[in-house]
Image: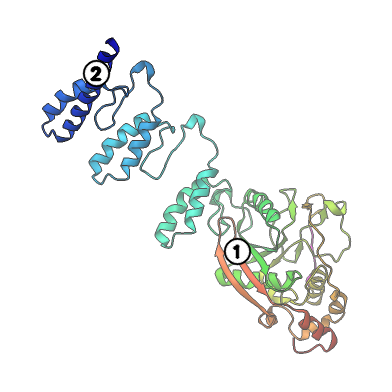
Amino acid sequence: MRKTSLRWLILLQVVATLVLTIYLHLVKTPGDRKTLQKPLRAENPYENVGYGGKWSPTGRTSSSSSERVDILTTHLHLVKTPGDRETLQKSVRAENPYEQVHVGYAGKWSPPRRTRSSSSEKVAVLTTHLHLVKTPGDRETLQKPLRAENPYGNVRYGGKWSPPARNRSSSSEKIAVLVTFRDREKHLDIFLRHMHPFLQRQGLDYTIYVIEQHGDEPTFCKGLLYNVGFTEALKEDPTYDCFIFHDVDLLPEDDRNLYTCSQSPYHLSVAVDTLNYSLPYQELFGGVSALKTWHYKLVNGYSNLFCGWGGEDDDMAIRLKLHLLKLSRPSKDVARYKMLRHNKTERNPQRYDLLTHWIFRTKRGDGLKSLYRNGFTITSTSHRELYTHILVNIHKREALAKDFTSNRHHW
């Protein structure tokens, strides 16, 4: 009898709860709704969940506020009225578990000064966005904070840097550093990290140009790339009066090794660690060298025909002698370089034939004068954060080289 009564009592409670819940959907007056909710809350088996699925923990059982923050943050995407958005944001900021990130404002956050780390992350975000900006005004606006927090000494877009007047070196030269490059991304990254601070400590007005080869030609055509870089740099800024020709795998060790042009051609990489910090032979002009703009034009630049390792620097030394330009060098105690490890480039089997016939090539204008007859196209020129990038597509040159060494015409 007692069990039967208990069952009826439970059944009545369930029926009463259902009736109240159903009736609440029909009630329109807030007062009636409030009155009916009181017995519902008292008999609610789900921890007194409020009408509409609302529930708040008591102080002793309160957990983290991340659930509420997620709900408010999601709702911010739907709110249209600025007043409502601001009201919701106050609640989110007060209970935001993500270190007071400004929710609804593109995830912006700045650390307190006492815990602030390096600014490289912010610079990276701004730099990425710069690639998407088309309007010059917007680009300039974004560049201001980039320059202010750039770890490479406020390098301007395109790898350009000018010293303040008080820090300018005694040299008034405007310098273009040309770096030829293919498949050496790691070396290029190390090079840029090292060279920007190095050049800035010398107070130089400079720009770094990276001339990258791609295309069907399997061997590396350094002389042709230098000619392309020289020509394109002067198109961008005709006021360059000094050019530094630089291998990407050589890093200067001493700040006293000044990257400027003297009155004569200047060979800078005198002592390299892999060569026991000694000069292999007196006519060497490879690695790192400096030429005034008029020097380079006078000798007609590098030969365009040397592809593969060896020959182009020796050919340049011959050109300098032919025009009575005496080679000069800094002290080997100062001009010391570290060479980055790399695989040996394939040797140029035609280098000796080309060197032997230098008079014939000179008469035919091999160099700047014949540049656009040498099977290449400039794919793109772009300004990047730390350098100006010139991408050059060199077509396969086997037939050209064979034709010159056998018949010496039509090249």
Residue under the point 29% across and 45% down:
78
Question: The residue under label 1 is which amino acid type?
Answer: His
394 horizontally vs 46: left or right: right
Query: Disc 1 to disc 2, how far (Cα)?
Result: 86 Å
Question: The residue under label 2 is which amino acid type?
Answer: Trp
Q: Quadrant of residue 295?
A: bottom right
Let me know if residue 328 is in the magenta part: yes
Q: Which residue bears the numbered disc 1? A: 389
- Residue 276 coordinates in the image, percent (x, y): 88, 51
Of residues 243 and 156, the one drawn nearer to the viewer in this rendering: 156
Does residue 75 sit above or below 137 in this rendering? above
What residue span does the magenta drawing correspond to?
325-329
Q: Earlier in the sequence, mark 1 or mark 2?
A: 2
Marking on residue 189 = none
| Helix, strand or loop status at disc 1 | strand
| Helix, strand or loop status at disc 2 | helix
Does residue 284 sit above or below 59 in this rendering? below
Let me know if residue 82 is in the magenta part: no
- Residue 241 coordinates in the image, percent (x, y): 63, 67
Q: Rate crowding at label 2 as few (under 14), some (14 to 19) or many (20 or more) other CA atoms within 10 Å.
A: few
Q: Rate crowding at label 1 as few (under 14), some (14 to 19) or many (20 or more) other CA atoms within 10 Å.
A: many
Q: Which residue bears the numbered disc 2? A: 8
Residue under the point 13% across and 30% down:
30
Of residues 2 and 145, the one drawn nearer to the viewer in this rendering: 2
397 horizontally vs 118: left or right: right
Location of the N terminus (image quadrant): top left
Location of the C terminus (image quadrant): bottom right
Residue under the point 78% across and 79% down:
398
Q: Main secondary structure of the magenta part?
A: loop
